Image (tube, rainbow, N blue to C red):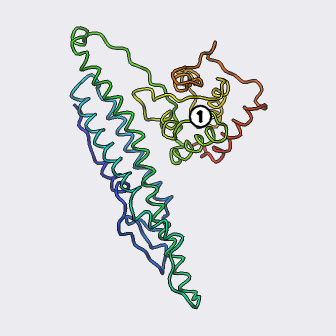
Amino acid sequence: MVRYENRLEKRINTLICNIDENPIINSDVPEESSYLGIKLRISEDGFQQQVQQLYNEFTDYLNKFLQEDSSDSQNNIHVIKTLSRLLSQYQNSLTNIKESQKRSEWRMQSQNFTLANPNNDYIITKRITYIREAHKFFFKMSGVQLLFLGRLIDYILPQVEAYKIGLSTKENNSSISILNQKQEPPKETAYYFSVNKEFTNKYDIYLNRLHEGLKDELKYIDCTTIEFKNLFRPKGTTYRKTPKPIIWLSGAYSHLAYFIKCLKDERFIPDSKKPSFNQIAKKLFYDNIEGKFFETKSDKSDVKETRISPYAEIKQIVNKILKNKPPIH
């Protein structure tokens, strides 16, 4: 049985699991203010890139860890215990940071902090500005922590559920398994959309905006952000089980198929043949009613006239959201 190594976990936990209770404010040189030892001059964007690199390494390792021999029940128990511990750890950290009084104070002070300045002294005015900038920086840094805690929870939770279901099934059917131990059970295909790696840095932002476009502008979905995001995975990471489908409300499969095509054309998702995009879509979306999947005569869904409504609106929204996509490397 392969043991879990926590080296990468410790490194990313240092950056995201705890709020900085005593960040440093430098009211004379604002760039020297710091959060978790990271200076304001590096900015929350630089911090996000640093955490992103660790997140990629950590999830790559977890992905390999999850691919170990699932026929070994002891290995499965080890995996479930490890994933459950990680899930609990990140859920607790997310709650603690979200509910932190410090974070609320930073948000308020980033706009309202002031000092007595009856003579409108230039130096005092500058000092007020610098201190507000520091509080704004602290608030944004904690926001980056929340972003990656949420991403890790989104990654781990479906894996825990899939392993628990698999282990329960094995326990309930242990006598049958012994009789049929020479027969390899067919592997269930997990259907989901992969997101190309060049979009990794702003993975959550793109999916959040796509969710808003479909829900608020087109009125084609009415699910939560997390339910929508669960239909996707960063390329290189996998689901062991198809995520819970969501309801597509437009009343036409061609609208859904065209939306997926637009994502492919913008390189957000890679081309897929086996399974095809349409096969994936039919496993991830219900037709107007929960439990009712789309039924079409063919997996082909070419739309010949895309300048008419609603295809033009679908394309416009996808292009607007993905217009600043990263270059191909």
In this view, the residue farthest toward the top is 179
- What is the number of callouts on the image? 1
| Secondary structure beneath label 1 | loop
Residue type at the position of mark 1: Ile
Q: Nearer the viewer, residue 157 or 236?
A: 157
Question: Mark 1 packing: few (<14 Cα in 10 Å), some, or many (20+)?
Answer: many
Q: From the viewer's perspective, is residue 309 above or below residue 25?
A: above
Q: From the viewer's perspective, is residue 177 above or below residue 25?
A: above
Quarter-of-image position of residue 315? top right
Residue 92 pos. (x, y %): 33, 50
Which residue is rendered at x = 33% and y = 32% of the image? Answer: 66
**In the displayed structure, does residue 183 sit left or right of residue 213?**
left
In this view, the residue farthest toward the front is 289
In this view, the residue farthest toward the bottom is 119
Residue 225 pos. (x, y %): 52, 41
Quarter-of-image position of residue 62? top left
Q: From the viewer's perspective, is residue 151 above or below residue 302?
A: below
Which residue is rendered at x = 67% and y = 21% of the image? Answer: 301
Per the image, the residue denoted by label 1 is 221
**In the displayed structure, does residue 283 sit left or right of residue 187?**
right
Residue 165 pos. (x, y %): 32, 25
Q: Quadrant of the N terminus?
A: top left
**In the displayed structure, does residue 282 sit left or right of residue 158?**
right
Which residue is rendered at x = 35% and y = 54% of the image? Answer: 17
Residue 124 pos. (x, y %): 53, 85
Q: From the viewer's perspective, is residue 329 above or below residue 131?
A: above
Q: Quadrant of the C terminus?
A: top right
Q: Nearer the viewer, residue 138 or 28?
A: 138
